[in-house]
Amino acid sequence: MPDRIISISELHGYLIDERNSGSLTEIPVVLYEMVHAELSALTNEACSMGDPFGEGVQSLLKERESLREYLRDLYAERTRKIFSLALAQATDEETNREELRFMVPGERSLYEIVANSATACRKALLDGKQTLDAPIAFHFISTDAGTAVDESFSADSISFADVYADKTFQNNNVNVDTAPESHRVIMVREKVEEFQDYSGRCYALSPGDIVSLPRFMAEILCNHDIALNIRLRK
């Protein structure tokens, strides 16, 4: 296995430090970029392996999901503190300048937007002063000057194809006519232990379930008589 860009234990350590500290802690300036590079590396490694249902692939995908969860938790912890700092700034309360230095570029942008918006709101509501200082959009910029962060950094973004892979479609309401071409609608004939596809969707299938799976995964199940392809052909 190639050297990891950042390990689960390292990220977990940053999360624990953040939870145990009453103030914003210092993290690497490129921590978010490092984690997303590691997520991509794990995905590529899993895709390069033969059996998507095999222990090796599933282990890599579980590791990837653990990284995602820790990153979300770290973001939540830090964002709460950043909001508090921004509101303190907007009400002219004393703030810890050291904490401002610990913000990575995207966090500093968030801080400034919240602080400026709260300040503008206070002036408008308390002082009757309308202001145009409040920003109208937030642009996350990476540490590389002029380079926007990849859209895949959004852990919550869901594509049209992903929707069909979601567990909410693992029932008789699956529309076999509108499933995307990259997926296949199948009917499960035998119990399949819990697994993930490469997009991170989790499945635990039982006989009679109708589900849309990535085509190559569906074909493996069908080829082993574990499922039947029920996609309608016009």
Image (tube, rainbow, N blue to C red):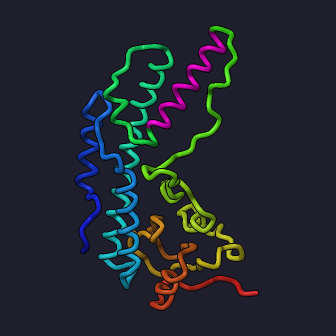
Q: Quadrant of residue 193?
A: bottom left
- What residue span does the magenta drawing correspond to? 108-126
- Which is more toward the observer, 218 or 61? 61
Where is residue 43 shown, x and y percent of the image?
A: 40, 70
Task: Please tell me which residue is depicted at 34% across the width and 46% down the height of the picture.
Answer: 29
The residue closer to the viewer here, 206 or 93, is 93
Residue 230 vertical placement versus 167 (above, below): below
- Judge whether residue 117 is colored magenta: yes
Quarter of the image where one finds residue 107: top left
Which one is nearer the viewer's eye here, 12 or 107? Answer: 107
Q: Residue 140, image x and y in percent?
A: 52, 46
Is 17 one of the magenta-colored residues? no
Q: Is most of the magenta stretch helix, strand or loop?
A: helix
Residue 66 is situated, as x and y percent measured from the top left of the image, at 34, 57
Q: Residue at x 50, y 55 (%)?
A: 147
Q: Note whether 215 is above or below 144 in the view shown.
A: below
Give x and y (percent) for residue 169: 59, 65
Residue drawn at x 47%, y 50% is 145
User: The C terminus lies in which quarter of the figure?
Assistant: bottom right
Q: Quadrant of the N terminus?
A: bottom left
> Image point 37% across, 44% down: which residue?
73
